[in-house]
Every structure is written in C-alpha cells, then in structure tokens.
Image (spheres, rainbow, N blue to C red):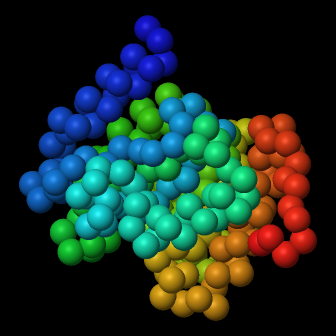
Amino acid sequence: MTIQARWNQFVDKCLSCRACELAESRQNVVVWRGGIKAPLMILGEGPGADEDRLGKPFVGRSGQLLDLLLSSFDLKEKDYHICNIVKCRPPGNRVPTREEAAECRKLLSEQLRLVRPTVYLLMGGTAYKYFTGSDEGITRVRGLWIETNNCFVMPTFHPAYVLRDPRKKSLLWQDFASVRKKLEELSFLPPLRIDAGEI
Ligand code: SF4
C-alpha cells in the first residue's frame, strides 16, 4: 500500500473516531496540515474555534503567527507536519483532560509512525506535558533540546501565549531558529540565507 493510501486510511479513521467525549461537541476532527512525510512535527494543544470550523490546525491568530515564523525561517509545507495533542475541540477551549489526551494519543502514535519526523516542536505547556509526561513548567524547559530515540524535541511557548505577552516573542523566535539549525545539522535543509534585517 502506498504512503498516500495508508495516510488516507488513517485520516478516515480519525474522522470517524468517537473514542472520547470531545466527539460530542466538535464540528470537525482536525488531523493535520503540512506534508504527510516531514522531518519536523509541530504539536499544539488542541483545536480552537477557527480550527474546529475549518478542520485544520493553527488557522486562527495563533496560526498566523506560526505561519509568519515558518515563512521567516523558509520552512515549506513539505518540511513540517502540524497537528495537536487532541484532534477535537475541547468545549470553551478548556485544556484537554488526561483521559482525552491519552485516548487521542493512540491516533497520534499512529500518525507519528506514518509521518516519521526526526525533530519535534512542542508548542505550549499542555503539548509538552502530554507528549513527554513531564509536569515541569514550559518556562523552565523551553529552548532546551530533549534527545530521545534518535529524535530531537524542542519545547517552546504556544503562539497564543506570545500574542498575549509579546515580551516572549523573541524567545519563540530563538526556539524556531534553533529548530531550523537542527534541521540543517541533520541535513534535512540547506543553510538558511538571511538578508540583514529580514528577521
Ligand atoms: S479527541 Fe481524539 S480520541 Fe477524542 S474523539 Fe476526537 S479524535 Fe477521537
């Protein structure tokens, strides 16, 4: 079976999933945007109102900031795969429960086996907590690489947090620069050429 066929099968499985109570209130199951095979996986917490409506992750204000970062570091759709810890919107944008995250992790694990990323960018404390199992605060761990099973994991702030507190913007930028550099070191991307003052 081709990767595209396997991917389509996986997406169908996600779209019909009713394994947790988030299925009750969702409009759409939000699976991914970006490449099906990509060296970089970007993980957020869960879909918000815009994402739920449109069925794509990071398409609201946070998504605009994320897209600005991606284009600033010359990351193309084929280079990244964006998804969330849970694929259905928690009502009122509450944090997903541990049970919901654990249920959706089964789908996420399948997704990882298909996408096979080497570098992970975890956006926000919830993505960090549920992905790694650690309760450490994001402020303490952001910007520090975690190396595990030949993969490299970078925790950083969620764009929504940076939009609320713009003083954190430079740190988010730094973490993106670090991710870009890692992708270059691993030969997934050529060195970034930046014109002075571009970023
Ligand atoms: S959040 Fe995940 S586990 Fe829960 S219903 Fe949606 S796809 Fe299924």
Q: Residue furthest top?
A: 1
Percent position (x, y) of residue 145?
A: 73, 60
Is 103 placed left or right of 35 in the picture? left
**Image quadrant where residue 143 sits:** bottom right
The quarter of the picture where the C terminus appears is: bottom right
Residue 145, compared with residue 8, is above or below; it is below
**Which one is nearer the viewer's eye here, 34 or 117?**
34
User: Is residue 145 left or right of 92 when viewed as pictured?
Assistant: right
Q: Is residue 55 left or right of residue 164?
A: left
Determine if residue 36 is in view. Answer: yes
Residue furthest left in the image: 24
Q: Residue at x 47, y 12 (%)?
A: 2
Q: Residue at x 61, y 38 (%)?
A: 78
Above or below for 149 versus 51 = above
Q: Residue at x 79, y 41 (%)?
A: 189
- Residue 5 in which image quadrant: top left
Identified at 39% across, 67% down, the residue is: 60
Whether residue 85 is visible, yes or no, is: no
Q: Position of residue 170 (x, y in %)?
A: 71, 81
Q: How many marks?
A: 0
Report the quarter where the N terminus lies. top left
- Where is residue 36? Give x, y as percent: 51, 32
Compare residues 68 and 171 and report the one nearer the observer. 68
Q: Position of 199 compared to 116: left or right? A: right
Residue 26: x, y in percent? 16, 56
